[in-house]
């Protein structure tokens, strides 16, 4: 059980639709923690139900925190005629991380996947995760590549070098260590919760997502979880992360809080490792501005005296110089690991690691 009483997990959570007996027949639960975003929730649900894999049993768990759109969300979910859906309602909202953790308590299957209510899966997702599960390899958590949907348009802008690297790494896997998160994530993953696949038991034993890490709780969780558990990144695109005005990390002060909390995550990692500590001390300000990458890229930046200005931030020229240097070191680290993976493959890892 997740051992944090602040969330009160499944207390005051009510089943409004579905038969929990069906879940006992399933190997995987795909969970959507929902809150007030009916416009995108339907696409998320449809993407889970309309998979190319038709023979494997899986269920969809929706845990909805109360909002002023509850009745509309309820009508939407009730309109689906399928035994796959288990719909739970939380009249007293559990909050972001509380609802994520609630999903894992409600899911009574060996494996649990998580998808936010404004993202969606590609039709190959279920076939991909069952291929991983049935390969008889040991893992506790699997991350996947995802596309980025920016204001209703898939963002394909990237450098030629990164394109070549991604093509070489396509459909390859590799072990994720804590060092990946001093550089922000695994192979440039923006959202580690987008289609993430867990083995449920070690997740619950670990204690779930932590509320005090705020809007970077997903990054911080994976960064800590990988210290003692087997975490992998599979470079196959199976989902779409939506970057839009309705996204919670793109709203006002939330944006600033997310960047600051991500920087605090890097600081915690640096405190436990001498090499990471040196990197952090050299590039701490540059790391901060590098964290703003998606926001800098898609929002207007204006000149203001000798500084760059972004809503909620003052970006110094010193910080921008550090950012450029840090990005070079980051690329060397990520691409270096990738090249080793290409050249040596499974020999670079443990004998029981994933081999897809």
Image (spheres, helix red, strand yellow):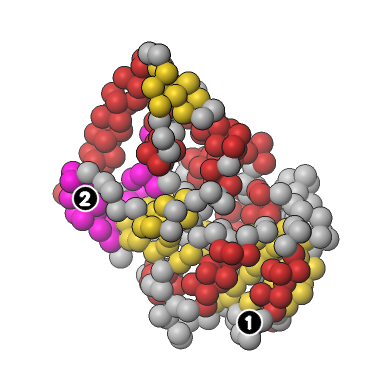
- Say whether residue 168 is left or right of residue 74: left
Which residue in the structure is indicated by mark 2? Answer: 163
Classed neighbour count for the residue bearing mark 2: other residues with Cα under 10 Å, few (<14), some (14–19), many (≥20): few
| Quarter that holds the N terminus | bottom right
**Closest to the observer: 272 or 180?**
180
Q: Quick check: marks 1 and 2 in contact, CB under 8 Å? A: no
Residue found 53% across the figure and 67% down from its top: 44
Residue found 40% across the figure and 30% down from its top: 301
Mark 1, secondary structure of its residue: loop
Residue found 58% across the figure and 42% down from its top: 251
Q: Is residue 42 visible?
A: yes
- In the rendered view, would you say 74 is above or below 281? below
State the image coordinates of residue 252 (x, y, percent, origin top left).
59, 37
| Residue 80: assigned label | 1
- Say whether residue 279 is left or right of residue 343: right
Mark 2, secondary structure of its residue: helix
- In the rendered view, would you say 81 is above or below 272? below
- In the rendered view, would you say 156 is above or below 52? above
Residue 170 among magenta residues: yes
- Give the extent of the magenta segment: 160-189
Residue 269 among magenta residues: no
**Closest to the observer: 201 or 71?**
71
Q: Dividing the picture into quarters, in which one does residue 324 lie?
A: top left
């Amino acid at each position: 059980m997740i051992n944090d009483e602040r969330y009160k997990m499944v207390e005051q959570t009510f089943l409004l639709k579905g038969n929990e007996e069906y879940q006992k027949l399933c190997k995987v639960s795909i969970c959507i923690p929902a809150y007030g975003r009916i416009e995108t929730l339907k696409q998320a649900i449809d993407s889970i139900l309309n998979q190319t894999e038709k023979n494997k049993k899986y269920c969809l768990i929706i845990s909805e925190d109360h909002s002023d759109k509850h009745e509309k969300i309820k009508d939407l979910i009730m309109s689906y005629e399928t035994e796959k859906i288990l719909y739970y309602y939380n009249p007293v909202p559990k909050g972001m991380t509380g609802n994520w953790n609630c999903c894992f308590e409600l899911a009574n299957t060996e494996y649990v996947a998580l998808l936010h209510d404004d993202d969606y899966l590609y039709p190959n997702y279920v076939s991909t995760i069952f291929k991983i599960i049935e390969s008889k390899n040991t893992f506790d958590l699997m991350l996947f590549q995802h596309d980025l949907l920016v204001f209703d348009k898939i963002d394909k802008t990237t450098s030629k070098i990164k394109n070549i690297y991604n093509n070489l790494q396509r459909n390859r896997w590799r072990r994720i260590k804590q060092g990946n998160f001093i550089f922000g994530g695994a192979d440039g993953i923006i959202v580690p919760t987008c289609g993430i696949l867990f083995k449920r038991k070690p997740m619950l034993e670990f204690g779930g997502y932590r509320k005090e890490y705020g809007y970077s709780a997903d990054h911080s969780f994976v960064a800590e979880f990988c210290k003692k558990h087997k975490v992998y990144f599979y470079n196959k695109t199976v989902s779409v992360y939506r970057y839009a005005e309705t996204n919670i990390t793109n709203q006002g002060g939330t944006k600033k809080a997310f960047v600051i909390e991500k920087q605090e995550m890097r600081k915690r990692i640096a405190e436990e490792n001498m090499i990471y500590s040196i990197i952090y001390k050299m590039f701490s300000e540059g790391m901060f501005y590098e964290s703003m990458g998606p926001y800098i890229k898609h929002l207007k930046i204006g000149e203001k005296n000798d500084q760059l200005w972004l809503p909620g931030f003052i970006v110094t020229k010193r910080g921008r110089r550090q950012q450029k240097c840090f990005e070079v070191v980051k690329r060397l680290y990520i691409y270096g690991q990738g090249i080793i993976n290409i050249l040596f493959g499974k020999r670079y890892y443990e004998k029981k690691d994933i081999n897809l």
